[in-house]
Amino acid sequence: MKTGTFFVRVWRTLSIAGLLFALFNSYISYPGEVAVRFDDLGTPIQYVQRETLFYIAVAIFLINNTLIRAVGKLFLRVPSNSVPVPNQALWAKNRSQLNEIVMNWFSALQAAINTILGLALMVISFLNRSDRGLQAVDYAWLMPMSAFILISVLVALPIRMAMKPAAEYEG
């Protein structure tokens, strides 16, 4: 197994475990109405029912982990001459490597969404605990970090597809 494949599989597995932990841990700690939006002073201005937030997160988790996986599996069935990649003839000769790269990318996309959702649930949980004096601005890192994770994953595939297959470097 290649290092990239190992990293993506471990990240995906840990992101699923982390999201499930955050989901159930935050559900237990949420009050009946969960503050999800705050004004500039840190005062809650919008609330959502605990069950609603829980079921939305579960729906995102299920859709993410089934739909993206299904699309990834469908990619394997696309004929080599129909795959829209640069250097199509070169990648057609190395279809197994192309399949591995694309499946890793779909797994990384799943892991990114799971990671971001888990972090968001954790932050909402922290902000709704009465035993903490933290403000919403204490978690301003969540949005830039989420954007960084998503952009990194989304940009990785086009960059990798612009490169030659590894077999072409060896020979």
Image (tube, rainbow, N blue to C red):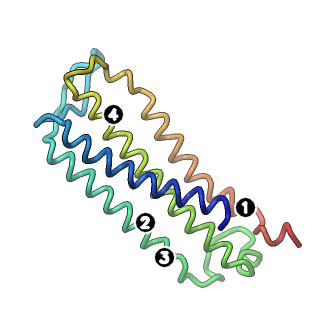
Q: Residue at x 22, y 21 (%)?
A: 131
Q: Which mark is residue 68?
A: 2
Whether the residues at callouts 3 and 4 have beta carbons within 8 Å, the answer is no
Q: Secondary structure at mark 1?
A: helix
Q: What quarter of the picture does the N terminus occupy?
A: bottom right
The answer to whether 154 appears left or right of 36 in the picture is right
Q: Residues within 10 Å of mark 2 (few under 14, many from 20)?
A: some
Depth check, front residue: 144 or 135: 135
The residue singled out by tag 3 in the image is 73
Q: Secondary structure at mark 2?
A: helix
The answer to whether 14 appears left or right of 7 in the picture is left
Q: N-terminal of the two: label 3 or label 4? A: 3
Marks 1 and 3, how far apart at CA: 22 Å
Marks 1 and 4, how far apart at CA: 37 Å
Q: Amino acid at mark 1?
A: Ala
Q: Amino acid at mark 2?
A: Ile
The residue singled out by tag 1 in the image is 162
Q: Residue 61: x and y, percent? A: 33, 57
Q: Residues within 10 Å of mark 1 (few under 14, many from 20)?
A: few
Whether the residues at callouts 2 and 4 have beta carbons within 8 Å, the answer is no
Q: Secondary structure at mark 4?
A: helix
Of labels 2 and 4, the one closer to you: 4
Q: Is residue 126 above or below residue 113?
A: above
